Amino acid sequence: MSDTPRRTAAITAVGAYLPEDRLTNADLEAMVDTNDEWIRTRTGIRERRILRDPDKATAFMATEAARQCLERRGLAAEDVDLIIVGTVTPDMHFPASANLVLGATKAWGFDLSAACSGFLFALTTAARMVEAGSARNALVIGADTMSRIIDYTDRTTCVLFGDGAGAVLLEPNTEGLGVLDAVHYTDGSGADSLSQPAGGSLRPPTHETIDARLHYAQQDGRTVFKRAVVGMADAAAEIMERNGLTADDVRYLVPHQANLRIIDATARRMGLSEDKVMLNIERYGNTTAATLPLCLWDWESELKRGDNLVLAAFGGGFTWGATHLKWAYDGTGEGGTQNAEGAPE
Ligand SMILES: CC(C)(COP(=O)(O)OP(=O)(O)OC[C@H]1O[C@@H](n2cnc3c(N)ncnc32)[C@H](O)[C@@H]1OP(=O)(O)O)[C@@H](O)C(=O)NCCC(=O)NCCS
């Protein structure tokens, strides 16, 4: 047996970007046949952020989040080895948005398409690279400009989503902190339940696909809801069991923010009380790949070195999973609260 401590990859900084423009439930009432009460009780959402500037998109938000993350760690873009962007709304199909982040010419990287599980899958991928010594560090970014693929005449989807980006920096650790374990799953039978049907190689954009509104995200909400409740709760329970974690051991559940009822079901299955669940869906809606890093950013000042976090997500595709993370530093107080009314006390 070697005495060399296991090398893990730990989060050493967080950053985020949220567009200033807010789309409230009252705004949506004026756009489609819906109401504030329905949206709040069925989803938990009150408002979302929207990136209005037509010349800016996902790479812009990812860059802003990454810049804040690096500034907090005192690093420059040239210091970064690897950049992975979880997104389903890249600026273009190619080049990858990861290529456009920060103009970081010393880094390589790629976009990872796993919908709402994009950040979770990217975190595991980057962590393995850092553990293996293939990268000195890595920026893991979740960024989505959902407003560009949402049909604002479809009340079943337009009330759910918002825009935003979050970033974390991963660096090697030999003290048992960082990304310790992860379980991930995909099931392509979910492709018809939540997708952006046209615009890819199967249905390239034509006048017909545009007229049929197939370039917008479409979902069968009920099917996704049922699968999400089971998928997120199962994955969270599995990661706890595999790592011998009881509810008392877990400081926070960091759940994908798609629907408050899905999050509640996951927390119940884990035996966690409300105060152990990160929640910001009320303020940002579902920002797809950005929800998990936005939670970490909002709660950063609350986190202490050694805290056990369970991250859990479910997304289109279907994709889902959970990660056990030991937080590596005491919160700096620079968390997201400066930009987030109603953030944790
Ligand atoms: C979308 C979602 C909020 C809908 O909630 P729900 O409780 O399942 O509601 P249903 O789809 O059963 O619809 C109930 C009724 O509300 C109506 N409705 C749907 N959207 C509405 C809206 N925005 N405002 C008012 N009524 C609405 C439906 O038309 C339906 O009416 P009907 O009973 O007359 O047919 C829910 O299914 C959900 O969150 N699904 C998962 C979404 C998700 O997580 N997506 C991202 C991937 S992680």
Image: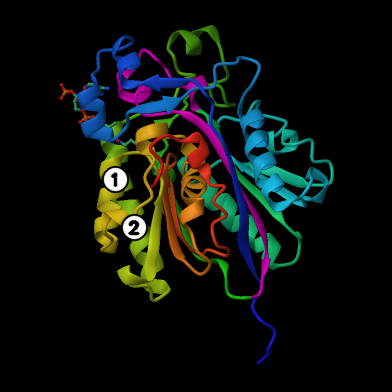
Q: From this view, report whether residue 228 is shown above or below residue 44.
A: below
- Say whether residue 109 is left or right of residue 17: right
- Say whether residue 240 is left or right of residue 300: left
Q: Nearer the viewer, mark 1 or mark 2?
A: 2
Specify whether tag 1 is near ligand 1 (CB below 8 Å). yes
Q: Position of residue 218 (x, y in %)?
A: 39, 25
Residue drawn at 24 percent across, 57 percent down: 268
Residue drawn at 49 percent across, 13 percent down: 209
Q: Which mark is residue 262?
A: 1
Q: Position of residue 4 (x, y in %)?
A: 70, 84
Q: Which residue is mark 2?
A: 276
Residue 163: tell me if it is visible. yes
Residue 12 position by quadrant: bottom right
**Mark 2: which secondary structure?**
helix
**Mark 1: which secondary structure?**
helix
For the residue pair 327 and 230, the one nearer the viewer reads as: 327
